[in-house]
Image (cartoon, grey):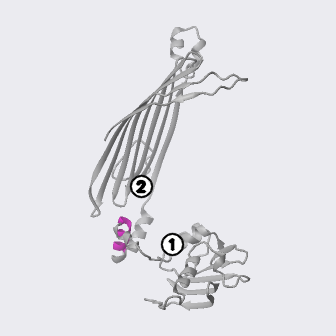
């Protein structure tokens, strides 16, 4: 709660010191009395960028100081994370120098605007026009319900006891038998035309059960799972880097699932990509590309704001045939090249 506001050398104000008591305070006045100037000074304390034109006397610095009672705001963690001294009565001071520079202090500790604005957003809510739109947001509705139900202590207790465990596995496997290209064995020569690279990533976050640890990243339990990312990619080459032609097939499978306040959202992608490059004579390079993508998204909720769920499926097929006329560039010669792209797309939604 804002308990005191002090303003010196700001806009029309030479010096002002006002205190606020518990309960409702109303400041009234006719147009031009300075109501908005008070709000402007308070905004500087909350982290708004300073403007040299707001100085009343250009030869003196502007000082704005706000005193806040924060014992019920549960901000001790914020102060610890930002290496600040926590006080139940916290004083925030903002100074604007005649040179145009500004300084900010929290309990006499210098801070940057990022820290100041993050703290300010948790101290005061400034309501203006069109902010009634927040009434339709799920997170805002939950905060109102928790506030009316006086669930603050329960929420803090839950957040302190919600322990998570995260498993992450990343693996890349490359098979490259091209070194057998000069081998006399026919079978080794055959396999030397192929090249394969596989990468796999699992990032899984689950709610811990007591002190038990589950080190298996492949196990998935929907009951205690908070987040999941699965990425698989395999690229298979034929004649990779050869003189005349190269063919590649790529398979991609991605899956992500996140638990939200109203339920969960899950995204899935499967992609098949084919690429063929062929050099014709000395000046032409032909490239054929084809891809088939399948996107799926599922959203489910368990609150009145979203009862039930829905699925979104999307499929896309893409083919392209760009032809490139590119003469081989020698060290002493550079020729211009011409490129033409032709694409055909079809979608099944």
Tag 1 secondary structure: loop
The x and y percentages for residue 31 are 50, 88
Q: CA distance from mark 1 to mark 2?
A: 32 Å
Taking 258 as reference, is 87 above or below it?
A: below
Residue 142 is one of the magenta-drawn residues: yes
| Residue pictured at 58% horizontal, 81% vertical | 41
Picture residue at 70% right of the left edge, 85% below the top: 57
Badge number at residue 208: 2
The residue under label 1 is 121
Q: Quadrant of the C terminus?
A: top left
From the viewer's perspective, tell me whether residue 59 is left or right of residue 221: right
In the image: residue 33, left or right of residue 312 = right
Regarding mark 2 in the picture, which secondary structure is present there?
loop
Question: In the visual, does 224 lie left or right of 55?
Answer: left
Please tell me which of labels 1 and 2 falls first in the chain: 1
Taken as a whole, is the magenta stretch helix, strand or loop? helix
Q: Position of residue 208 (x, y in %)?
A: 41, 55
From this viewpoint, is residue 326 visible?
Answer: yes
Q: Label 2: how many residues lie within 10 Å, few (<14), some (14-19) or many (20+)?
A: some
Region of the chain picked out in magenta, as a range: 137-146
Classify 282 as above or below 288.
above
How many marks on residues?
Answer: 2
Residue sticking out furthest to the left: 308
Q: Nearer the viewer, residue 278 or 231?
A: 278
Vertical placement of 228 versus 11: above or below? above
Pointers 1 and 2 in contact (C-beta within 8 Å): no
Which marked residue is nearer to the observer: mark 1 or mark 2?
Answer: 1
**In the image, what residue occupies the spot 70% across and 23% down?**
333
Q: Which mark is on residue 348?
A: none
Q: Specify whether residue 147 is painted magenta.
A: no
Q: Position of residue 270 (x, y in %)?
A: 39, 37
Depicted 282 relative to depicted 146: above or below: above
């Amino acid at each position: 709660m804002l308990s005191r506001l002090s303003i010196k050398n700001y806009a029309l104000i030479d010096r002002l010191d006002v205190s606020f008591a518990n309960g409702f305070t109303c400041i009234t006045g006719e147009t031009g009395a300075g109501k908005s100037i008070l709000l402007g000074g308070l905004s500087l304390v909350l982290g708004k960028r300073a403007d040299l034109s707001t100085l009343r006397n250009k030869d003196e610095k502007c000082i704005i100081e706000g005193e806040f009672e924060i014992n019920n705001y549960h901000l001790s963690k914020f102060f610890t994370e930002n290496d600040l001294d926590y006080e139940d009565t916290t004083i925030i001071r903002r100074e604007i120098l005649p040179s145009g520079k500004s300084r900010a202090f929290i309990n006499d500790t210098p801070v940057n605007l990022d820290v100041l604005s993050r703290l300010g957003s948790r101290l005061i809510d400034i309501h203006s026009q069109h902010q009634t739109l927040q009434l339709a947001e799920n997170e805002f509705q939950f905060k109102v319900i928790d506030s009316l139900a006086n669930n603050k202590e329960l929420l803090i207790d839950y957040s302190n006891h919600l322990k998570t465990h995260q498993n992450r596995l990343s693996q890349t496997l490359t098979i490259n038998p091209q070194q057998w290209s000069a081998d006399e064995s026919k079978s080794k020569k055959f396999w030397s035309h192929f090249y394969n690279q596989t990468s796999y990533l699992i990032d899984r976050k689950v709610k811990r059960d007591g002190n038990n640890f589950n080190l298996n990243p492949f196990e998935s339990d929907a009951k205690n799972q908070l987040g999941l990312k699965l990425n698989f990619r395999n690229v298979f080459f034929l004649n990779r880097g050869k003189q005349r032609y190269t063919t590649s097939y790529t398979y991609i499978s991605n899956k992500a699932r996140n638990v939200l306040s109203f339920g969960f959202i899950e995204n899935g992608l499967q992609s098949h990509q084919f690429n063929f490059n062929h050099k014709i004579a000395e000046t032409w390079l032909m490239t054929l590309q084809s891809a088939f993508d399948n996107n799926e998204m599922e959203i489910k909720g368990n609150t009145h704001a979203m009862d039930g769920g829905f699925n979104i499926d999307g499929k896309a097929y893409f083919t392209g045939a760009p032809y490139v006329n590119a003469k081989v560039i020698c060290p002493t010669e550079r020729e211009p090249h011409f490129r033409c792209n032709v694409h055909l797309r079809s979608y099944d939604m």
